[in-house]
Amino acid sequence: MSDLAHLRRDFPLLGRAVHGKPLVYLDSAASSQKPVQVIDAVAEFYATSYANVHRGAYTLSDEATTAYEGARAKAAAMVGAASPTEIVFTSGTTAAINTVAYGWGLDHLRAGDRIVLTVMEHHSNIVPWQLVAGRTGAELAYLRVGADHQVDLTDLEEVIDERTRIVAVSAMSNVTGTMPPVTQLAAAAHAVGAVVVVDAAQAVPHLPVDVATLGADFLAWSGHKMLGPTGIGCLWGRADRLEEMSPLQGGGEMISDVGLYESRWAPVPHKFEAGTPPIAQAVGLGAAIDYLDKVGMDAVRRHETAITGYALDRLATIPDLTVHGPTDLAVRGGAVSFTLGDIHAHDIATILDEENGVAIRAGHHCAKPLMRHLGLTSAARASFYVYTTEDEIDQLVAGLHTARRIFGLS
Ligand code: PMP
């Protein structure tokens, strides 16, 4: 295993106890913990440089604007964007996908057009499209998921047909950890002239992502899952796509001129950032990107692959336990969903918390169509990040043996 154990010292919260046991935090797919470098950057910004941005002709506002725009440049570099102007700050992945669904979809979709999704999408990459389909008369079509937990490509050409205007796909499932072949799906989408929207909420935090390699037109992700604050996320859009997209919200900051009856928009990305933006959150996100840069996204990916491999091996030794996800580490990330006999996922989570101080997620993981495909109403999920150790996986496994004992499975 790669040794990133020393990083744990940077995460104050990981030093705390739960029910008298050292906390084992295995819910990073829901939200990551924050290093002191990010916490300090936000506090320092408020303490020394805080003011509103793009407004005041005074030093403090200039400093705040430089910090805010500096974070945009870091986000652009992280995903290989051609320019910082291709990054729109949003409140997170959900807001970013809604920005595209309404901003691009309402103007460009007509009755009979197709929006193609996969069955493994998170609700935030399904519901906005349902809403926009309802408003435009476009129809939804789905690529199925196979028994191998991968997107089934056998009917690719039938589903992504000539009517398709949008293909919206996750780069990594938050349930099974599956990494779909986004580049291949994007090529099929572009062959029929469709726009490719990538939900990268679970990808950008965990592995190197390059928008050109993916062949995406839009990419959405959240700061809070990648060591950054809540309330900040990014929408990357190819410059020409952003240009042809309408703003979702009107207000201050997003205009170049306002008359009584009509207005003109500020250039991208500002036309999509109405009102006072999440300034300190952007600064925190910039610090998170600096932190991940220093570790190196290749090292992050290597560490998580090693930890996931260790977890899959250890979980395979537990009787009655089924992992719902690919076993091939090359096509998966560190979100590991499982069921244990007929023990309810919430009972598993409660026992792990109370007996071993282990925090995992339990439920439908905001992916009900995928859960139905798996024949489940709920599952337990352990998920990993840069700070996860083998010892923590051992605690998880010990807790699962306790759960089996309590429920009379052994
Ligand atoms: N897509 C995926 C794959 C996710 O895992 C999540 C968060 N669970 C989201 C979208 C939504 O992200 P947010 O809640 O930060 O908007």
Image (spheres, grey):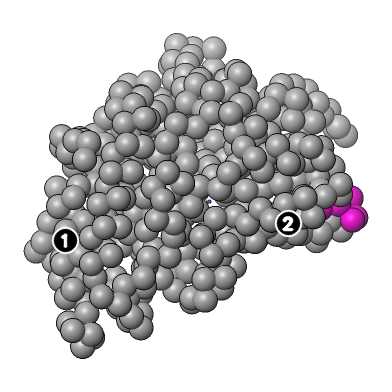
Q: Is mark 2 within 8 Å of ligand 1?
A: no
Q: Secondary structure at mark 2?
A: loop
Question: Is residue 331 toward the left or the right of residue 234 in the image?
Answer: left
| Magenta span of residues | 109-114
- Contact, mark 1 vs mark 2 (Cβ under 8 Å): no
Q: Which quadrant: the N terminus?
A: top left
> Is residue 307 on the magenta stretch?
no
Give whichever of 232, 143 is nearer the camera.
143
Whether residue 107 is visible to the viewer of this picture, yes or no, is no
Q: Residue at x 58, y 23 (%)?
A: 81
Give whichever of 319, 290 is nearer the camera.
319
Q: Secondary structure at mark 1?
A: helix
* Residue 352 versus residue 192 in the image, above or below: below
Q: Is mark 1 within 8 Å of ligand 1?
A: no
Question: Is residue 393 toward the left or the right of residue 161 in the image?
Answer: left
* Residue 40 versus residue 389 in the image, above or below: above
Return the residue at label 1. 395
Q: Which mark is residue 97?
A: none
Q: Position of residue 115 (x, y in %)?
A: 76, 52
Circle 2: is it few (<14), some (14-19), or many (20+) Cα within 10 Å?
Answer: few
Q: Residue at x 39, y 56 (%)?
A: 327
Return the residue at label 2. 155
